[in-house]
């Protein structure tokens, strides 16, 4: 994998997938071009994980130029989403082509990763309230053994 730099951000190049990044103060867009499969999934996962950092609010993954996605590609997206959740980042998928949307629905039903029909729609949604760390939530158990 080689890296080139553009005026909008960096582009990681794999023979079959390109990740272009545009950072703005309130969000980051990672536009993917190519195929998400067993061969490209590790590079995709690593590229998305590198974009996540504490304090970031929104990461939108633009899938409008992804021609193919299999279970490994879906797994890479979900892996990045889990890390985003741990950091309190709202990760969203935008504009998947119909075949890619079908694979996402078939391979990861009920995963909870939000998918939007267009990039502008994904960017219009406000970020969710900050996620609380798991240990910070009050427990609902009350002692009745006293």
Image (spheres, rainbow, N blue to C red):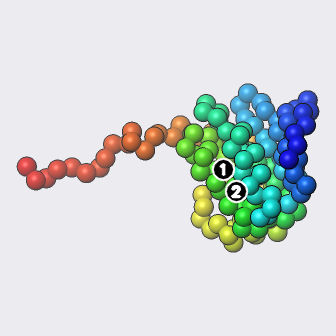
Position in image of residue 83 (x %, y %): 60, 46
The reply to whether callout 1 and callout 2 are in contact (CB within 8 Å) is yes
Q: Residue 101: tell me if it is visible.
A: no
Question: Disc 1 designates what residue?
Answer: 80
Q: Nearer the viewer, residue 31 or 3?
A: 3
Query: Residue at coordinates 67% horizontally, 61% vertically from top-left?
Result: 75
Is residue 128 toward the left or the right of residue 23 in the image?
left
Residue 45 image label: none
Position in image of residue 92 (x %, y %): 69, 49
Position in image of residue 118 (x %, y %): 81, 51
Query: Residue at coordinates 64% horizontally, 66% vertically from top-left?
Result: 108
Circle 1 packing at 10 Å, graded few (<14), some (14-19), many (20+), is: many
Is residue 8 toward the left or the right of residue 115 in the image?
right
Question: Disc 2 designates what residue?
Answer: 76
Q: Residue furthest left?
A: 146
How many numbered discs, if any? 2
Q: Nearer the viewer, residue 133 or 94?
A: 133
Circle 2 packing at 10 Å, graded few (<14), some (14-19), many (20+), is: many
């Amino acid at each position: 994998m080689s890296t080139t730099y553009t005026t909008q951000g960096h582009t990681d190049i794999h023979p079959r997938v390109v990740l272009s990044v545009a950072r703005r103060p309130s969000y980051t867009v990672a536009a993917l071009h190519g195929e998400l499969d067993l061969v490209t999934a590790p590079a995709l996962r690593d590229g998305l994980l590198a974009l996540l950092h504490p304090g970031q609010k929104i990461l939108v993954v633009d899938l409008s130029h992804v021609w193919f996605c299999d279970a490994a590609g879906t797994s890479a997206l979900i892996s990045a989403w889990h890390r985003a959740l741990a950091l309190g980042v709202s990760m969203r998928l935008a504009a998947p082509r119909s075949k890619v949307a079908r694979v996402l629905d078939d391979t990861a039903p009920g995963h909870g990763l939000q998918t939007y029909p267009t990039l502008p729609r994904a960017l219009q949604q406000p970020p969710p309230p900050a996620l609380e760390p798991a240990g910070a939530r009050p427990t609902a158990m009350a002692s009745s053994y006293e």
